[in-house]
Image: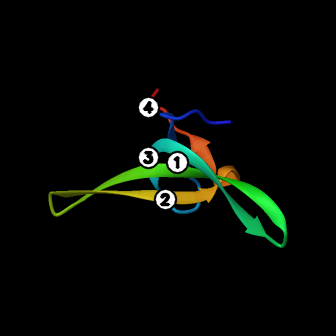
Amino acid sequence: MFAIGDYVLNQKTGHLGKVVGYGHQINNSVSIVTLKVLVAESANSQKREYVVEDRISAWNRWSVA
């Protein structure tokens, strides 16, 4: 399980960001836990931030060590 503030990497999309919350999705009457992650991206020296939500199983803890 991830804690708010942990840094995570999405295995499929490559998004890297900080956990800001949890959510859920309903798929075929089954509730699936999701993570809400604040992703920061810089393009042409303009900084953009947005929230990405995906299944918790799609994320790995990320560390620089």
Q: Nearer the viewer, mark 2 or mark 4?
A: 2
Q: Nearer the viewer, mark 3 or mark 4?
A: 3
Q: From this viewpoint, which residue is outermost toward the top?
A: 65
Horizontal relation, residue 60 to residue 48: left or right:
right
Identify the disc placed on residue 23.
none
Within-10-Å neighbours for mark 2: few <14, some 14–19, many 20+: some
Q: From this viewpoint, which residue is outermost toward the right?
A: 29
Q: Quadrant of residue 44?
A: bottom left
Identify residue for label 4.
64
Badge 3 element: strand
What is the image's colouring?
rainbow
Of mark 3 and mark 4, the one earlier in the sequence is: 3
Three-letter amino acid code at disc 1?
Answer: Leu
Q: From this viewpoint, which residue is outermost toward the left?
A: 45
Badge 4 element: loop
Measure the C-alpha gap from mark 2 to mark 4: 21 Å
From the top left corner, tell me how far across and down residue 35 is, in percent. 59, 50
What residue appears at the point 50 percent right and 42 percent down from the top-left corner? 19
Badge 1 element: strand
Q: Is there CB contact under 8 Å for labels 2 and 4?
A: no
Measure the C-alpha gap from mark 1 to mark 4: 12 Å
From the top left corner, tell me how far across and down residue 53 is, in percent. 55, 58
Identify residue for label 2.
52
Q: Is there CB contact under 8 Å for labels 1 and 4?
A: no
Identify residue for label 3.
17
Three-letter amino acid code at disc 4?
Answer: Val
Identify residue for label 1.
9
Measure the C-alpha gap from mark 3 to mark 1: 7 Å
Horizontal relation, residue 34 to residue 39: left or right:
right
Q: Quadrant of the N terminus?
A: top right
